[in-house]
Amino acid sequence: MKSKKLFAILTLVAFLMTLVPAMAFGAGEDVAYAAYNEGYSKTDVDDEVLDAGDSTTITVEFRDDDSNRLSEHSPVDEFWVKTSKRTVKVTVDPEYVANKELLEGDNSGFKAITKDEDSEEIVAYELDFSDGPVHVPKGALKVLGSRSEIEFEITSAAACVVEISFWSKNPDMEKKDGGSGEDSLYRIGAVVEIEFESKEGKIYEVNLIPDDTTVTAGDEITLTAEVLDKNNDGISGKTVTFYKSDEPNSGWSKIGTATTNRKGEAEFEYTETEAGDFYYYAKCGNKDSRDSEKKGKKITVEPEEPSVIEFVTDEGKCFDVDADDNKIKFVVKDVYGNKITSPSGCEVEVKVTSAPDDSDLEDEIFKDKDIEVDNEDEELYIEVDFDEVGEYTFKAKVSGASAILTVKAVEVGDPVEIDVRFDEKKSLIAKDADNRDEDADTLKLEVVVIDENGVETDADDYKVYSSNVSLAKVKEIDTGEVTLLGPSDKDDRGVVTITVVDRGSGLTDSIEVPVVGEPYAIDVDYTVSGKTATVTLQYVDDEGEVTASGDDDNYEIIAPEGITIREKEKFDEDSGEASFKAIANEYGEYKLTVVTDEGIAKKFEIVIGEPKDEQKGGKGLVTMFIGSTGYVVNGVPLISDVAPFIKDGRTFVAVRPLANAFGVAPENIGWDEVTGTVTLTRDDITVTIVIGSNDIEVVQDGVISTVTADVPAFIENGRTVLPFRAVGEAFGATVSWDEATQSVTYEL
C-alpha cells in the first residue's frame, strides 16, 4: 500500500514538473530558466556570402555543462548579442519569446515590429545596437525544437562584411584579470562572419586612402583604393591601377595594380626612396580617385637619417681675408642621396681644426643657428670672417660621417682679369610689347674681377657697351651686375655683343648674347647609364634657337609601363631647360610624350640597352561604305552583319568589322556588360571605349593617353556601334571620307 502511495506521489510530482515551462509564460510569475555553458553552445549560419538586401539565419544552439541540449521551450539565462556593423538589421521571431514584458521595457534593446501601422500583431523583434551590444534578459527568450535553438535573421541593405557574436557577459563592459571583456571565455560558440555583396556592380566612385601622409625615405607606403557602386557599396574582384607623380596633376607613371577584396578595397604597397612631395591616384574602369582639378593624394617623403656629409667649396680655394661674408658650403645626404636641409634636426657641426698663428678661429665650432641654408641649391653654408692670412682647415661631421676642407685667406691683389658671365639665362627673348622699358625681356650678367690668386670680387667701376642697341641695351648697372633690356619686336632676332671695360685697370671682356623668339617647340637629348636615362628638354623658338619662357613651366610626362620617372625638374625660367630621369625595369625601346602647361608637346623614344623588335599590327588599308554590309581590307572583300550608318551627322560602325580591320582577333574583343566597356587588344595597343563616354583610353607600348570623341559609343538594336573617326585615330590610322562614294577609309 505504501509503495502504491509513493508511486502516486512521484507520478503527481512528475506531472507538475511538466507544467513548469507552461507556467513560465505567465506575466509577472517567477519562472524557471535554463542555464547554459558558453563553451558547449554553438553558432551556425545558413549563408556566409549573399547579396545586399537579402537575409540569412544565424542559429544559436544552447547546451548545458554536460554538453546536453536544453529542453524544448526552456527559457535561457541572460546573454548579449554584438555586431561589428550597427547598420545591419538583426531580428528574432516572436515564437522564441518567453516573456514579452522583458523585451518591451523602456530600457530594452529590442524594438517590436508590427505587421503594419494599424496592426498590433508583432511579426518580429529587432535588436537595437545603437548603445552597443544588446542585452537579452534572463528568461526573455526560450529555445525551440529538438536542437534547443534560437534563430536570428540577419540582413543588410548595404554591401559590407559583418561579424556577429553571442556572449554570456557584456563584451564591452566585463573584464577578466585586467584583460579585455572580449575574452573568448565568455563567447557563445564561434564568431559568425557574413559578407553582403553589392548587387549593382557598376563602378560609380573610386577613392584612394593612404595609410600615412608623411613617411620616411625607404619606408613602405600603403595605398588603399576603395571601389564603390552608386549605393556606396564596395565592389569586389575589380583590378585597380595605381599611379604616381611628383606634381599635383601631371606626369603620371603607373606603379602597379591590385584587386579589390570583398569590401571593395584594393591595397598596394610601394617603397619610395626619393625625398619630396609625391602625388598618387587609383583608377578602376573609367573612374579614378583624382579631384575635379585632376589632383592626386599628396604624400610627403622625408629624408632618412643623415649618413654623408660633403664640402661643396673647392679644395684650396682662396678667399678675401678682409671680407666678412666668405661662405664655406657643404651638403648633408641620407643613405639614398637625398639632401637634408634642416641643420638643426641632424646635429651638423663644422669645426676649424687648424688656422694660422695669431688667428682666433682655431677650434671655433659652427652649429645650429650658425649654419644657414641656400634653398636654391639645397646646400648648407657657414659665413666665415677670416682674421689672418694663411691656411684654414675645416672638419664637418654628422652622425659619424665627416669631411675635411682646406682653404686659404689672402689679401686681394691687383686685378689681372675681368670676367663677364651669364648669371643663369642664355638669351634675351624678343616679343611684342607696347612699352619696351616695362614689358621687354631682361637679362642679368655677372661681372667680377680676378686677382693673381684667383680671388674673385664684384666689379664696382666699369662701363658697358652694346653692339646693337635695337637688340639689347643697358638698362641698369650695379656693383658686380648689369641688366640688359631686350627688343620689343618679336621679329628682331640676332646676336648682340656686350663689352665690359674696367675703368681702373682698363681690362675688358666681351660676351655674345643671342636674341631669340619665344618657345615654339622642345628639343630632347638623353644619356643612358645602366637602366636609367637622364633626359634633357630644351625650349627652342621657331628657328630652332635655344630660348626660355620666363616662367618655371611645368609639364606632364606620359610614360609607358615599365618606366618610373624620378628627379623631374621644371623648365628653368631663364635657361628654358628641364630634365628628368626615366628608370626602366627592362632593357628596350620606350616611347614617351612630354606636354607643357602651355600646350607645347614632344613625342620621342629612348633606347635603354638592346632595342626590342618592332611590333606590327593593323591591316593597312580598310574601306567601309555607308549602308552596306560589305567592306574591303587590303583589297579583300568581306561582309559585316551591321552596315555603317550616319546619325546626327556622325558616322558609326559596328565593333567586330572595325576590330577586324585594325587587326584585333575576335578573342581579343572584350565586353564588360556591368560597366558597359568595350576593350580592343592588339599586340601593340589596347583601346578601351565606355558606352556613353566621349573619352577613349589608349595604351600603346605602355603609354596611357586619351582620345576625346565628339560623340560617344552607344548600343543600337542590341549591337554596340562606335564613332569611326575617333576610334580610327585612337589606333593611329589616317581617316578619310569620300562624299562621292559615301565611304570611309582607314589607312594604317
Image: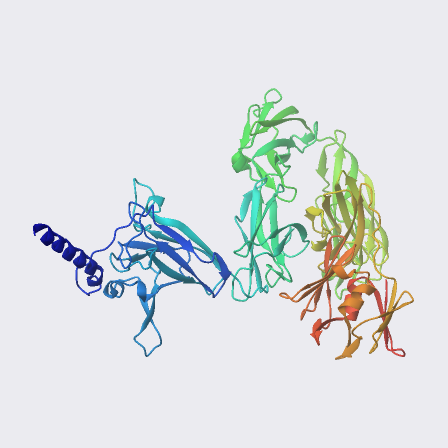
Residue plotted at (57% across, 45% down): 221
Hey, which residue is sitting farthest front in the picture? 1
Q: Is residue 70 above or below residue 642?
A: above
Residue 468 occupies which quadrant of the picture? bottom right
Question: Which of the colour schemes (rainbow, by chain, secondary structure, one colour) is used?
Answer: rainbow
Does the rendering let one see residue 21? yes
Q: Position of residue 50 (x, y in %)?
A: 50, 60
Residue 140 occupies which quadrant of the picture? bottom left
Q: Is residue 581 above or below residue 705?
A: above
Does the rendering let one see residue 524? no
Q: Position of residue 37 (x, y in %)?
A: 30, 47
Hey, which residue is sitting farthest top in the picture? 357
Does 111 sit left or right of 711 as displayed? left
Does 475 sit left or right of 733 as displayed? left
Foreground residue, 325 or 41?
41
Residue 175 occupies which quadrant of the picture? top left
Foreground residue, 170 or 304?
170
Q: Quadrant of the C terminus?
A: bottom right
Q: How many marks?
A: 0
Does 59 sit left or right of 472 as displayed? left
Q: Position of residue 505 (x, y in %)?
A: 79, 37
Hey, which residue is sitting farthest left in the picture? 1
Does 168 sit left or right of 665 as displayed? left
Foreground residue, 50 or 60?
60
Q: Position of residue 449 (x, y in %)?
A: 75, 37
